[in-house]
Amino acid sequence: MITLPKIVLASGSPRRSEIMAAVGWEFEKHVADVDESPEVGESPEDYVIRLAIEKATAVASEMPGRLVLGADTTVVIDGEIIGKPVDLDDARRMLNMLSGRRHEVLTGVALVLGESVTSGIERTGVIFAGLNDAEIEFLAREGEPLDKAGAYAVQAQAALFITGIEGDYWNVVGLPIGLVYRLFSRFKDAQQVSMV
């Protein structure tokens, strides 16, 4: 048997909460308030790791002695970070960029307990079919794109148009739960403590 410790999820994402609940990992939410703007010249990989660590450490500072999970997900195409759209026109622009192409979903994950931090990154390739104007409009109007990196949800309407996924599906949904478990296992071994 394995024991999963109660964890503090430094995220307001309903998808992350659903994934944690689906695997039976007990958690409570405590949303971190951090500036999510990319820094000048920052790579997408450095960006998601930095934000995951910042979110987790911000919450950990308010909840000493608790194990905190931070995560940040972004979509990358042609080396460009594609965050969440600011409005429906921006969502249409993003979906047009993704149409008929492969992009990557990157998620940085960080676990923090006191002064100890461990982090990792998950990278998943996603291939969209070519989208016509009506399909882009459908996703913009019906897919609730404004709170989603890349303006789509793989587990919702966008599933109609995705022709391939290379890697961890759960990463595209919003949390690479396998990576979270691997980081926890490494963290627990290094800490030599039972974090229950």
Image: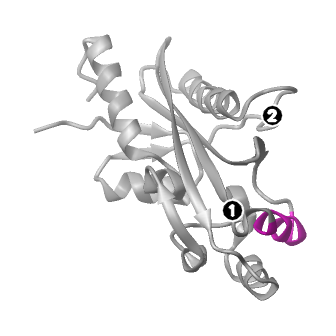
Was residue 93 drawn as part of the magenta stretch in this picture?
yes
Q: Nearer the viewer, residue 166 or 157?
A: 166
In the rendering, which numbered label is found on residue 192? Answer: none
How busy is the neighbourhood of tag 2: few (under 14 within 10 Å), some, or many (20 plus)? some
Secondary element at tag 1: loop
Q: Between disc 1 and disc 2, whose residue precedes?
A: 2
Q: What secondary structure is the magenta-colored segment mainly?
A: helix
Calculate the distance from the C-alpha at mark 1 to the C-alpha at mark 2.
Answer: 24 Å
Q: Is residue 164 left or right of residue 25?
A: right
Which amino acid type is shown beneath numbered disc 1?
Arg
Frontmost of labels 1 and 2 is 1
Q: Nearer the viewer, residue 44 or 66?
A: 44
Q: Position of residue 143 (x, y in %)?
A: 67, 76
Residue pictured at 87% horizontal, 27% vertical:
40
> Which residue position holds label 1?
101
Which amino acid type is shown beneath numbered disc 2?
Pro
**Magenta stretch?**
87-96
Residue pictured at 39% horizontal, 51% vertical:
20
Q: Is residue 186 above or below residue 31?
A: above
> Which residue position holds label 2?
38
Q: Position of residue 89 (x, y in %)?
A: 89, 70
Residue pictured at 72% horizontal, 64% vertical:
151
Q: Is residue 65 above or below residue 70?
A: above
Where residue 169 sits, quadrant-wise, is bottom left
Q: Quadrant of the N terminus?
A: top left
Callout 1 touching callout 2 (CB < 8 Å) = no
Q: How is the image coloured?
A: one colour
Q: Quadrant of the C terminus?
A: top left
How busy is the neighbourhood of tag 1: few (under 14 within 10 Å), some, or many (20 plus)? some
Q: Position of residue 79 (x, y in %)?
A: 75, 41
Q: Is residue 161 above or below residue 126?
A: below
Where residue 191 sits, quadrant-wise, is top left
